[in-house]
Amino acid sequence: MLPRWDIRHTNIKYFLGTVMALCPEILKAKKSRGRPPKHPIKHYAALIAVKEEQKASLRKAETDYSEEICSERVDHSVIHYWEKKLKDVYIAFSRKGWTTSL
C-alpha cells in the first residue's frame, strides 16, 4: 500500500499502466453480426476503470480520458454501452485487482 502523500495516488498514467497490466487478455470481441468495435475492448475496459477510480462522469471521461487511452475521443454513449456490457468482467477484474494491489 502506498503512503497517502505519494504522487502516484493522483497520477492517472500510473493507474492506467497498472490497469492495462491487470486487464485480462481474454477480452475479445465475439464473432457475431454487426460491426466490430472501433477500439480494442481492453481500451474500453481501461477507460471505464479510470472513470470509476476518478469518480468522474461519462462526459468527463469522454473529454479528458478517452483521448489519452484510445488516441481519439470516444462518445459518452459508447462508454456507457461498454460499461453495461462488461459488468461481469469488472466484478472479476476488481477482485483480481484488489488481491494483487494489497
Image (cartoon, rainbow, N blue to C red):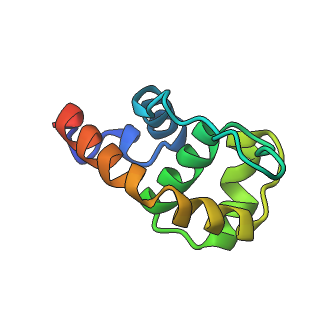
Q: Tell me: residue 85, above or below residue 59.
A: above
Q: How many marks?
A: 0
Who's the residue at 35% across and 44% down the image?
Answer: 93
Residue 79 image point, x, y percent:
66, 62
> Is residue 84 rendered to the left or right of residue 33?
left
The C terminus is located in which quarter? Answer: top left
Picture quadrant of residue 87 = bottom left
Who's the residue at 73% across and 71% down the image?
Answer: 77
Residue 1 image point, x, y percent:
17, 37
Who's the residue at 83% across and 46% down the image?
Answer: 72
Q: Tell me: residue 43, above or below residue 100.
A: below
Picture quadrant of residue 85 = bottom right
Which is more toward the observer, 53 or 25?
25
Who's the residue at 52% across and 44% down the image?
Answer: 12
Which is more toward the observer, 65 or 4?
65
Which is more toward the observer, 71 or 96?
96
Residue 99 image point, x, y percent:
17, 37
Residue 25 image point, x, y percent:
49, 27
